[in-house]
Image (tube, coloured by chain):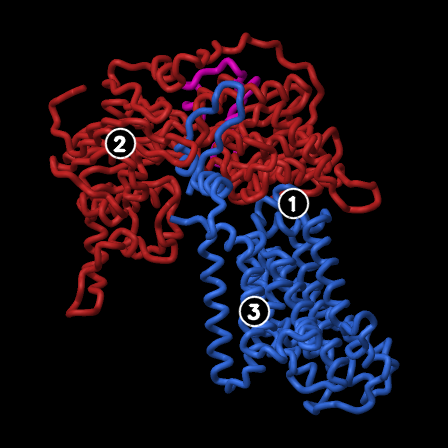
Chain colours: A red, B blue
Amino acid sequence: MTGSATALASLRGLRKSYPGVQAIRHVDLDLRAGEITGLVGKNGAGKSTLIKVLAGLVRPDAGTIHIDGRQAHLGSPADAARHGLAFVHQELALVPDLSVAENVLLGLGFPARGRTLVHWPETYRDAANVLARLGVAVDPRRPTRSLSLAEQRLVMLARGLAARARLVVLDEPTASLSNAEIGHLFRVVRALRDDGVGTVFVSHRLDEILDLTERVVVMRDGTVVGDVATAALDRQRLIAAISGPAAKAPPARRPSRPAPAGEDILQVRNVSRSPVLTDVSLSIRAGEVVGLAGLAGAGRTELARVIFGVDRPSAGTVSVRGRAVRPGRLRSALRRGIVLLPEDRRHQGNILDFGVRSNVTLATLRNHRRTPRLALPSRRSERVAAQHMVERLHIATASVEQPVRSLSGGNQQKVVLAKWLQHGAEIFLFDEPTHGVDVDGKQEIYELMRELAAEGKAVMFISSEFPELIEVCDRILVLRNGRIVAELDGDTTEATLLKHCFATDPTPST
Amino acid sequence: MDEAVTAQHAQPPPAGGPAIPDGDDAVARRTARRRTSLGHILGRWGLVVAVGLALLAFGLASPDTFLTADNMRSVLLQSSAPMILAVGLTILLVLGDFDLSIGSMLGLGGASAVALMALHHVPWQLALAAGLGLAVIVGLLNGVIVAYFGASSFVTTLAMGTVLVGVEFAFTDQKTIYEGVADTYLTLGQSAPFWGINVQVWIAAGVAILVWLLLEHTEIGRFFHAIGGNPDAAYFSGIAVRRWRVLGFVLVAVAAAVAGILVTAQAGSSAPQAGITYLLPAYAAAFLGSTSLRPGQFNVPGTVIATVFLQIIQTGLQMLQLSTAYINVVQGAILIVAMLLSRLGQDRA
């Protein structure tokens, strides 16, 4: 441990258990002013519970928290704010219909005119000042709803700053941000550090941890198993620390394969959808994993939606084995065997209150009829199918009736995949399938994609993380401003991908 | 909350064994399974207990009149039309939609059938079919406007309610009609085929069983639950979301018309705007029912028991010969207490 900075917050002997689960076994941790601390660990390692304890959302069973050397009682989010703790949660805690200024100052009280009226000019000025400190060029009068995801995260950060937060906790703040936006966020965090603010940075993206932090705290099974200066770490060692002794090392780069000789299954011809897609053509062969790289906003998700028939292209065709998909008709795409595993898994992937069984059979309920003529599903038949998928995909669930809401991100993703495997799909579009999934879960998803290809399916893999594209894909297409600007083979490098992504408007990444 | 927030405080699964599910909800559920405390039992069976308590209390208060077979038959009879409406409404609530025109539809269904028979000498079969046919049209209109054109169901169905009252007036000229109703039509509301129990009760029971089968044991029911649970995910799974939502609006409108026909058949007459008073009790029954049996979900058995519960209170209070003012206050208060009691069982810190 470095001892130079003073401890802003000291956690000692923290313990928290839920019935049947010891979420935090024993945590001692010092968080210092002017230091960026990375917090990493698999899903279930206890990171979120720890953050919730700090945020006043969860009361620990034992242990103490000292802030500035004085014992602090964090019984509610208001307590946490009073002690100078600010949180940028993944899920945005902003009121979308209020202005940016109102959101920044929410909970602090607005500058008053007289006794009761809000002094609006001063409100906007105050908010603008805070935003300027973060280098956010957003009109504080704008409705928050109209901001990009990245800007909204910065507004949350601004709220913390306005409250004079001295310790900021960022929980997966870079999810679905573009590289340029991430670069900006990092600059802001570093500037805060220079002003003496302590930062806790939670991320599954290890490159970001290595890039940004000065110190990394690794949690596993509810305890801190590592607390190291970042300078002494590299990616391999970090993965090993997170996975623990039992986990196997990630496999070395796949042996280079000959290009699959399968026929073209999916053909996309001259697809346009103004203003997001312009004249996109591509094809995917049986047995092939094709990556789709690009910055946020380059049109990757939009392309997947057009292929899946969610959105209607203004021009161009999508066809499967030469048979056209009716444009903008999802059910037509499904009939042709195209399926999408959407980026927004929670809202578009599963019915969270349904059990694993009902989600797995949702698209194929017809196959489980008691008798062919009557639309009465047989739960027994469904259970058999779901159980089969649970075993095949190694879905970690207590039973097939377990509500999907209670599964981890990786397992929820597998349930979506199980639904489509039941459907007998031929073309799988994976849109950011590893978002919010821990290291082991990611590896499993990569392997599943490769297995699908090995079975002769066509796989499209959309990702913002170049290393995983390079690890998994046979070919990688780069989408920039709605056009395909490059086609690279699977042995390409991150640098090449980056070059193509940024080619027209280069922006330094960090 | 994102899954990384909810899904953290579990340990990795023991080697080879099933994973321990993580997340607050799972924790709550595990707690629920383990605990068979009074609160938990009340949460699931609270409404049934409430029915028992209400029977007991009113039985003691009016010992000679309340707990008699005749009175119980009367309670069931008076629950019938509201039950058909509330059960129909349950379908739509499962879908995550709602409809404020069902009260007016109930009025129009009955009034149109009666008016056609009495004023236009239409045979009762045709009059009945016309009432039901109107419901199908109204349901299609509501459903298409809401599901296909994306209009707010609140405003659409509120406006539709006004339209339907107007249509009803066009049929009846705002008059109470009590002559010229076919005898066969009257038997729909007044005969008692088995054990002295009115035919309406049997019809209501039949409707409840059919809707229960539909929601819990058919593909359509699964799709309805999926759409109500997450319309986007249902759509992305290839479910024809808009089509099923339209069907939901049609089914609730038809249920309303059936209830309206029974109401006029029992009364042997049709009174202007009779349907409006049925609207809020139907919602009260469906929501009260959703706190019980399958807490947190709209379910047919819950709706059925809740409808009967509301009628027991109504009848019991009337027998005490309290003033209408008291009856209103006590009725409302009992409803609130019943809601609170059922909250007790739902595990929350």
Marks 1 and 3 sit apart, C-alpha to C-alpha, by: 60 Å
Q: Position of residue A157 (x, y in %)?
A: 27, 43
Where is residue A475, by image quadrant?
A: top right
> Could you say whether the residue bearing mark 2 is in a helix, strand or loop?
strand
* B338 shown above or below A188: below
Amino acid, disc 3:
Leu
Please state the chain letter of the residue tagged with numbered disc 3 in the rendered image. Answer: B
Give the residue displayed 47% in from the left and 43% down from the top.
B35
Residue B239 located within the stretch drawn in magenta: no
Q: Residues within 10 Å of mark 1 (few under 14, many from 20)?
A: some
Residue A481 located within the stretch drawn in magenta: yes
Q: Nearer the viewer, mark 1 or mark 3?
A: 3
Q: Residues within 10 Å of mark 3 (few under 14, many from 20)?
A: some
Marks 1 and 2 sit apart, C-alpha to C-alpha, by: 53 Å
Amino acid, disc 1:
Gly
Residue sitting nearer the eye, B108 or A495? B108
> Could you say whether the residue bearing mark 1 is in a helix, strand or loop?
loop
Residue under circle 3? B56
Residues flagged by tags 1 and 2 on a common chain? yes
Q: Is residue B156 visible?
A: no
Residue most extreme to the top? A255
**Disc number placed over residue A14 in the picture, else none:** 2
Please state the chain letter of the residue tagged with numbered disc 1 in the rendered image. Answer: A
Please state the chain letter of the residue tagged with numbered disc 2 in the rendered image. Answer: A
Magenta residues (range): A472-500
